[in-house]
Image (cartoon, helix red, strand yellow):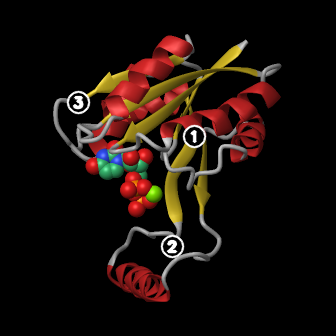
Amino acid sequence: MKTLAIVVPCYNEEETIHPFLEACQAVERQMANQLTFNYYFVNDGSKDRTLEVLRQVSKQFENVHYLSFSRNFGKEAGLLAGLEAAQGDYVTVMDADLQDPPELLIEMYAKIQEGYDVVGTRRADRKGEPPIRSLFAKAFYWLINKISDTEMVDGARDFRLMTRQVVDAILELKEVNR
Ligand code: UDP
Ligand code: MG
């Protein structure tokens, strides 16, 4: 059986960890014949009870693991520590606030099995966002794509599924922000 590591950076997520885990576990059950799930939560120096909640869920479920930073280092640092800790044939990185729908993992894994090394996600629209934020986001992507040679995709998220080979390659990079 192949294994999937789910890496989740957490900053002040005491209220979202339980709903997040429940949503993932529903997908875990649907995929039980294909994949074994392991969770790697990273507490990024939260000021609320995130660490207590993580301690509790890691006791309750043997496939839930956590790391904890002594202070806030930012999401990138949390992701990196999580990727370094994550064991498994495949690794996905997800936000704790359910803005990344865990149900998508089913389709993403199907794509990986077609032979892709990375399956990324993007928002197709900006529904539910304040119009002023959408306007500035649109302006930002228009401008950055004018001045940069590297295409930046509007709505692209960090939520992605990667093979072990890709994760190992990322971990070899020396940049501060991968
Ligand atoms: N996060 C983190 N450290 C930070 C800020 C955020 O680990 O300093 C985590 C946060 O808990 C969430 C993810 O990164 O799981 C995305 O954060 P947020 O939802 O605030 O970002 P946005 O949705 O605005 O991109
Ligand atoms: Mg968010």
Which corner quadrant holds the C terminus? top left
Q: Is 50 displayed left or right of 109 in the figure?
A: left
- Which of these two is toward me, 33 or 98? 98
Callout in the foreground (2, 3)? 3
Q: Which disc is residue 166 wearing?
A: none
- Which of these two is toward me, 108 or 148? 108
Vertically, is 126 above or below 80? below
- Give the residue number, with chain letter if any, for mark 1: 20
- Packing grade of label 2 (10 A; few <14, some 14-19, many >=20) is some
**Circle 3 sits in a helix, a strand or a loop, which is it?**
loop
Which of the 4 quarters of the picture holds residue 152?
bottom left
**Circle 1 sits in a helix, a strand or a loop, which is it?**
helix
Seen at 45% across and 70% down, the residue is 151
Which of the 4 quarters of the picture holds residue 11?
top left
Picture coordinates of residue 8, whole percent (x, y):
45, 37
- Give the residue number, with chain letter if any, for mark 2: 154
Seen at 48% across and 47% down, the residue is 95
- Packing grade of label 1 (10 A; few <14, some 14-19, many >=20) is many
